[in-house]
Amino acid sequence: MKLTDVAKVIRSKNAGPLQITIDLMFEDRERYDTAAGSQSLSPASLAQLYGLRQDKVRVIPFPQALAIKLVFDRNIVAGDPGDKDVYGTQQHRLLLGVEL
């Protein structure tokens, strides 16, 4: 099963010039638990997917809101030469193919 099968919302955005956040939101506890318990959403797996060091990835579960927040350090400061997504709105695309 893919993340897109269980998540109601998958979106990314800036969290200042040095970080990107990705919000994962779920319709019910069962879908949240499936994603929250998946090794595919561990810091190690996400670091590999995004080409980051594991210590640059944080996974913050919010079970009360049926949501998970992912926080990544940017490789390039927002707006610097070479930054292709200054607002961070396209960074969730790598998660669209993730199998849980």
Image (cartoon, grey):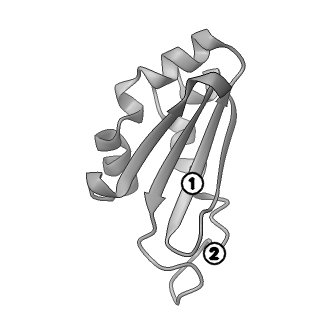
Horizontal and vertical percent position of residue 43:
34, 42
- Count neighbours of disc 2 (C-alpha within 10 A) and say few if under 14, some if 14 to 19, many if 20 or more: some
Residue 63 figure quarter: top right
Which residue: 51% across, 32% down? 61
Residue 42 figure quarter: top left
Name the residue furthest bottom: 81
User: How many callouts does the rendering have?
Assistant: 2
Q: Dot 1 corresponds to which residue? A: 21
Q: Earlier in the sequence, mark 1 or mark 2?
A: 1
Horizontal and vertical percent position of residue 9:
71, 35
Foreground disc of the pair 1, 2: 1
Horizontal and vertical percent position of residue 83:
54, 79
Toward the viewer: 47 or 82? 47
Q: Dot 2 corresponds to which residue? A: 86
Which residue: 66% across, 31% down? 25
Horizontal and vertical percent position of residue 47:
33, 50
- Count neighbours of disc 1 (C-alpha within 10 A) and say few if under 14, some if 14 to 19, many if 20 or more: many
* Secondary structure found at label 2: loop
Q: Amino acid at mark 1?
A: Thr
Which residue: 67% across, 69% down? 87
* Secondary structure found at label 1: strand
Q: Amino acid at mark 2?
A: Val
Residue 37 figure quarter: top left
Toward the viewer: 66 or 92? 66
Which residue: 33% across, 40% down? 45
Proximity of marks 1 and 2: CB atoms separated by less than 8 Å: no
Q: Is residue 46 left or right of residue 22?
A: left
Q: Is residue 39 left or right of residue 79?
A: left
Tell me: residue 55, above or below residue 75.
above
Tell me: residue 70, above or below residue 8.
below
Name the residue furthest front: 64
Tell me: residue 26, above or below residue 29.
below
